[in-house]
Image (tube, rainbow, N blue to C red):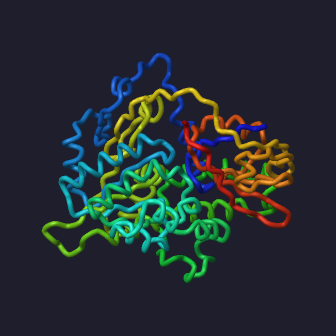
């Protein structure tokens, strides 16, 4: 039996690839002759990146500066609960200075905005809110790590805004390119600003990873590499542009004495170095943006440089209790395309989810399932209590299923 879990950095295959690469970068250790910077030895500290070298800063100064901007972007790695606790702390601190606030969330596509309005109005229970917002379809990460943010907005009557678009749009743009997507299918999104050169190079590396995985699964043959890369870039820019447009619409343009502070909750990959959402905001006439990111002591903290963000918070290390990873309850075989399920244990999570013997797993959390060995090596790090999206090939059809692993007792 295969014990299946997954380190899900992002849901989309585009950003899954980016997450893997960023994780690899963050895991690099500095040369042995260089000592670990003092600011990476203990957590719970702020560092300003306004100068060439990281400078220690106080939370009062960080919050005071951020509160003077039009938009504040709070990054995260989606599956790290402490990142959301830190976001809650920042929301509280910013709200104390700027009570006129709107909070935008990457997690929700625009079509569920009425559900967010009902939640803030107090007409939905938490269970009803998640069900009507289709959380298990639109996001799939454990809802309990996000609920404190949603509850904070509800009890303070802070409007929540859905920043995202449907995955079907970003997939369509990736397949066809921006120009060939009909205007009526673009969800009102305007043409994105061109990618900055450094962002283009970063996306090119992500595309190489994506292309390698697709080829391993017998992906499209004969497709122009240039056309494929262009679609890949267009899709990422569409995602960035959609969130930037939704945020910019909330920025007060009438010179009010107490304008609204607009806060965006999103993956750090959309914020780093100002390449994604900040770049699109600038093109939309919103240059006053603060970007704040949490960083791991033994990861990105070791490679900080000017321009990564306005400031970063060093996240303390957290010992994880030892426990057996959740069991999916399947026997897998490597197949020409994907992973074939040769057996499903009775009463297992796989059976409860609807998996059957003979199914082929073609994607795991949006990333191609390239082999059982790679899958086992990757997925064992995921803690219990997570939601794992799978794309299944069954006969001539493909199904999207979500395995809900039980939380740790």
Q: Residue at x 71, y 59 (%)?
A: 225
Residue 64, percent from left and from top: 19, 48
Q: Report the label total.
A: 0
Would you place residue 240 above or below residue 188 in this image?
Answer: above
Left or right: 46 in relation to 349: left
Q: Residue at x 32, y 43 (%)?
A: 311
What quarter of the picture does the C terminus occupy?
top right
Q: Is residue 311 visible in the rendered structure shown here? A: yes
Would you place residue 76 above or below residue 255 in this image?
Answer: above
Q: Nearer the viewer, residue 408 or 25?
A: 408
What quarter of the picture does the N terminus occupy?
top right
Q: Residue at x 30, y 53 (%)?
A: 290
Q: Quadrant of residue 307?
A: top left
Left or right: 336 in relation to 34: right
Residue 34, percent from left and from top: 44, 19
Residue 401, percent from left and from top: 68, 58
Q: Quadrant of residue 263?
A: bottom left
Would you place residue 77 above or below residue 322 in this image?
Answer: below
Q: Quadrant of residue 300?
A: top left
Outermost residue, bottom direction?
184
Outermost residue, front direction?
347
Q: Nearer the viewer, residue 337 or 194?
A: 337
Residue 241, percent from left and from top: 46, 66
Q: Is residue 201 visible in the rendered structure shown here? A: no
Outermost residue, top direction?
33
């Amino acid at each position: 039996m295969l014990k299946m879990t997954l380190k899900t950095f992002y849901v989309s295959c585009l950003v899954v690839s980016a997450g893997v690469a960023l994780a690899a970068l963050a895991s690099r250790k500095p040369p042995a002759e260089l000592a670990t910077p003092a600011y990476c030895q203990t957590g719970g500290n702020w560092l300003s990146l306004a100068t060439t070298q990281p400078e220690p800063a106080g939370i009062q100064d960080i919050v005071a500066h951020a509160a003077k901007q039009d938009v504040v972007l709070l990054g995260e790695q989606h599956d790290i609960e402490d990142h959301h606790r830190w976001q809650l702390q920042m929301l509280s601190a910013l709200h104390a200075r700027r009570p006129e606030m709107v909070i935008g969330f990457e997690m929700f596509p625009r079509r569920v905005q009425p559900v967010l309005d009902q939640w803030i109005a107090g007409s939905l229970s938490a269970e009803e809110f998640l069900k009507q917002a289709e959380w298990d379809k639109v996001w799939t990460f454990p809802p309990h790590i996000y609920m404190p943010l949603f509850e904070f907005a509800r009890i303070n009557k802070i409007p929540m805004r859905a920043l995202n678009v449907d995955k079907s749009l970003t997939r369509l743009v990736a397949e066809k390119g921006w120009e060939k997507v009909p205007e009526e299918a673009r969800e009102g999104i305007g043409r994105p600003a061109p990618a900055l050169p450094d962002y283009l190079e970063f996306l090119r590396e992500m595309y190489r990873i994506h292309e390698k995985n697709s080829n391993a699964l017998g992906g499209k043959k004969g497709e122009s590499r240039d056309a494929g890369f262009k679609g890949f870039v267009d899709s990422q820019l569409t995602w960035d542009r959609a969130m930037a447009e939704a945020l910019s619409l909330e920025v007060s343009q009438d010179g009010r004495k107490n304008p609204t502070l607009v806060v965006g909750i999103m993956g750090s990959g959309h914020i780093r170095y100002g390449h994604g959402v900040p770049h699109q905001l600038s093109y939309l006439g919103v240059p006053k943006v603060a970007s704040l990111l949490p960083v791991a002591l033994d990861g990105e903290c070791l490679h900080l440089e000017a321009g990564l963000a306005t400031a970063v918070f060093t996240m303390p290390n957290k010992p994880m209790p030892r426990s057996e990873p959740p069991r999916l309850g399947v026997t897998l075989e490597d197949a020409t395309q994907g992973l074939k399920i040769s057996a499903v244990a009775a009463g297992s999570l796989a059976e409860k989810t609807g998996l059957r013997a003979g199914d082929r797993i073609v994607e795991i959390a949006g990333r191609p399932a390239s082999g059982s060995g790679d899958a086992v090596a990757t997925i064992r790090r995921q803690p219990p209590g997570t939601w794992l999206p799978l794309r299944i090939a069954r006969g001539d059809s493909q199904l999207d299923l979500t395995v809900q692993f039980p939380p740790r007792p």
